[in-house]
Amino acid sequence: MGAGGGGGRRRRAWRWAMRAAASAVLWTAVVQLASIVGLFRPRVFADCGGGGGAAGAGLAAAAAGLAALASEDSVAAKLSPPALVPKRIYKSNGYLRVTCNGGLNQMRAGICDMVTIARHLNLTLVVPELDKKSFWADPSDFGDIFDVDHFISSLRDELMIVKELPLKLQLRTKKRLYSMPPVSWSNETYYLKRILPLARKHKVIHFDKSDARLANNGLPIQLQMLRCRVNFEALRFTPQIEALGKKLVSTLQRNGQFVVLHLRYEMDMLSFSGCTHGCSSKETEELTRMRYAYPWWKEKEIDSEAKRLQGLCPLTPEEITLVLKALGFTKDTLIYIASGEIYGGERRLAALKAAYPKLVRKEKILSPDELQPFQNHSTQMAALDYMVSLASNIFIPSYDGNMARVVEGHRRYMGFRKTIVLDRKKLVELLDLFQGGALSWDEFSGAVKEAHKSRMSQPTERKIIPGQPKEEDYFYANPQECLGSNGGFRDAS
């Protein structure tokens, strides 16, 4: 019995040892696999130390050590490359080169569309070229604004993106390149039937415009989701821009809550739109001359007052001052102005500064040395304003240009952060009545508040106007297909 008992104990011990060894091997494999795909966090061990005594203390210490090693702020975490998404393998139908047009946010939306088109047609995308010829004359390349390597690697499960054409095709396209602007607001069928055959024929196709080349509505959900993914995840600013943008945000946040006012009262916008309300006759002449100097600005003869009454002009600094007061913003409100140089300079900002002494700009927060690398690079300066606008407690654009709309949509994705979308047509009517003496201050203020109750970035459906894409709601201002009830990506399932 003793010998048999001893043999049984040995067999049980052997089985226990084998199970333990198998469990250890399996657990090791799981940990390694999970760490590869970025899902493993050793912090989970912290919940296993409930045994008390020396053993419990040992487990707790081990867990603490592992957690420290796995900390996202640790040096190792910062140096370790992120896990790559699996590469999508497909036969490319050719290369797509793109020259973007417009300012930062018009180009940003265009890049999202170009990625989506390239993916839909199984093309290889060449990293887009940025606009260097328009009003801003900014020499910045894609890599001066966006993190190129992140852009390429984060989308490798969707399409191939290369930094340049193969040498053979570079030489060929120097002699002959098929270049065209795609038709604005086109759907996926246009690209499949009209563009794909051209790409297959020429091997390289060049789009010389990128703005509004994809429809707002009626596209497959997968394409709409990809537009969002590019915008919210793949287009990351360079480390230099990110670092300075974060410094701006942290400086503002140390002083409490803050409002970003996107005051689009800049020379290019006023000249392009023909909006001269509040300008002197000399300024009006200057803006008109500039409009005629740019041949791609098609509208030349413009009735400024008619456009203003239709709500098609940016509010002036004096008008926005009254609107902010009417909405209830008090004198101690910290306001960051996100814009380039205000037309008319300090003279036009006088009323706003008097009403809101805590008015700041990036030039006031950052030192000249910090801003020096960004000087004469308006797109990089706009990227700093973009970061601050996303982080603000409230975002208020004075005009619904590209930055206003793209930031509004991004803030929806970030949890429907408050954006006050001003009803300029209604405001102009109320402002004229108040300044003409037909409304008291209380009546004016009450009417302004009432007009904006439902214009504070609440979840809404995009307005669709068949056949009039310019008049309907812009996809990037409200990418509803991508948003869950609290912002962030909606579950595609």
Image: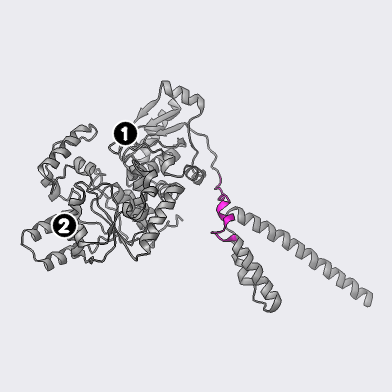
Mark 1 Cα within 10 Å, few/some/many (few <14, many 20+)? few
**Mark 1 sits on what residue?**
133
Residue 427: assigned label: 2
Residue at the left extreme, as displayed: 437
- Quarter of the image where one finds residue 180: top left
Q: Is residue 260 magenta?
A: no
Q: Residues within 10 Å of mark 2 (few under 14, many from 20)?
A: many
Instruction: Describe residue 57's horizontal placement relative to residue 177 as left or right.
Output: right
Please name the amino acid that badge 2 sits on: Leu
Q: Are marks 2 and 1 in contact (CB under 8 Å)?
A: no
Whether 350 is drawn above or below 306: the answer is below
Give the percent coordinates (x, y) of residue 176. 41, 22
Between circles 2 and 1, the one closer to the viewer is 1
Q: Position of residue 78 (x, y in %)?
A: 55, 53
Q: Identify the element where label 2 is drawn.
A: helix
Numbered circle sitting on residue 459:
none
Give the residue displayed 93% in from the left and 77% down from the top.
2
> What's the magenta region?
70-86
Circle 1: residue type = Lys
Q: Looking at the image, which residue is at 83% across and 70% down?
A: 12
Q: Is residue 431 above or below residue 145?
A: below
Quadrant hosting residue 46: bottom right
